[in-house]
Amino acid sequence: MENDKIININIAEVVRMLWADRRKVCIYSCVAGVIGLVLAFGTPKVYKSTVMLAPEESGAGFSGSLSSLASMVGMNMKIGQTGDALYPEIYPDLMKSTGFVVGLFPVKVKKQKTGEQYSYYEYLEKHQRLAIDEYPMAWLTQLKEKLSNDPQPGPGHKPDPFCLTKKEDGIAKNIRKSIDCSVDKKTNVITIVVEDQDPLIAATMADSVQVHLQHAITDYRTKKARVDLEYMEQLFEEARKKYDIARKKYAAYCDAYSKTVLQSVQSNIDDLENDMQLKYTIYQQVVEQLQLAKAKVQERTPAFTIVQEATVPIKHSSRPKVVSLIIWMFLGFMLRAGMLAWKNRKKFVNL
């Protein structure tokens, strides 16, 4: 359109302006670089440990093959599989749940350099290094806790996932940040990554998270079977007791009237024997059902293949200090260049 204005930036003028102000540009870049180095050296190193495992697939046969073919093209088809509500795609959400995170509080961890042992909760609460930029917020938090009149838990207090204290909730949030879980939709391989300031603790917690996840999945998959097994065990105890009573009653009656030939006595013996045989038949049936219930629990227990075990990382995963220096120096350069561009915008912009 005729009224549109084309803005042309005079690059040569911009370069001349920066060269003329090169002294302050260098000062800004150097100051920003110093700030970046201070933050880099004041930030604790972080180590990552990775675990990879593959859960058992419940699909089989032709339907399982179809699911495998669908997964190769990125489709997640649960053909022929059981109606479990706990499938691999929601494992990351399960690991972020309060109950799962609180279950990691009592895990015993040991520092690599000193060998000191703590619970994971105690370690995160008292033995974590803060980054230099986190100290102001930490001081404000401590001051707020001192000024508040919130009741403090006693020495025998156990964390309750239903009602956490403020400190417990803060520790739980830190754990959620340090644990990452991802699931490959094509292969269903679960990757668990745990990061920590201590390499040994990072590996320990990666292994513990894997074990807790396996237990949670196993508990869910076998819950109904275990309930049925408990019920069958109760029936087994009742049937066994009734059979023992009937057997002892029959034996005692036979011993007491072994020399008696009265028809009434023989009739009572027959009745007691029939009752004992009935109790024994019921007892045998319950024993068979109990064995089936135990087999059902074993059948429902999922199997996991550990693709990659947790190992103690050798190198940290933090950003290299040279990279931080370059980034901050570039930011300082851009800050000064932006200030100059705004101050002298009419000189190098041609309308």
Image (tube, helix red, strand yellow):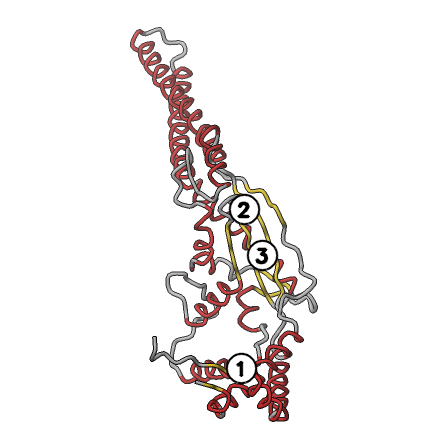
Q: Residue at coordinates 42% horizontally, 72% vertically from top-left?
A: 166
From the image, which quarter does the N terminus lie in?
bottom left
Q: Residue at coordinates 47% horizontally, 54% vertically from top-left?
A: 92
Residue 211 picture location, percent across and down: 55, 50
| Along the viewing direction, whichever of 301 and 232 lies nearer the viewer | 301
- Find numbered disc 1 in the image and state the secondary structure of the residue it sits on: helix
Q: CA distance from mark 1 to mark 2?
A: 39 Å
Count residues near mark 3 (Cα–Cα under 10 Å), then give few for <14, some for 14-19, many for 20+: many
Count residues near mark 2 (Cα–Cα under 10 Å), then give few for <14, some for 14-19, many for 20+: some
Task: Identify which amino acid the numbered label 2 is placed on.
Answer: Val
Give residue 53's mark: none
Is tag 1's residue or tag 2's residue first in the polypeptide sequence?
A: 1
What residue would you read off at disc 1?
Answer: 135
Q: Are marks 2 and 3 in contact (CB under 8 Å)?
A: no
| Along the viewing direction, whichever of 155 and 132 lies nearer the viewer | 132
What residue would you read off at disc 3?
Answer: 206
| Along the viewing direction, whichever of 243 and 185 lies nearer the viewer | 185
Task: Identify which amino acid the numbered label 3 is placed on.
Answer: Ala
- Find numbered disc 2 in the image and state the secondary structure of the residue it sits on: loop
Is tag 2's residue or tag 3's residue first in the polypeptide sequence?
A: 2
What residue would you read off at disc 2?
Answer: 189
Task: Identify which amino acid the numbered label 1 is placed on.
Answer: Tyr
Q: CA distance from mark 2 to mark 3?
A: 16 Å
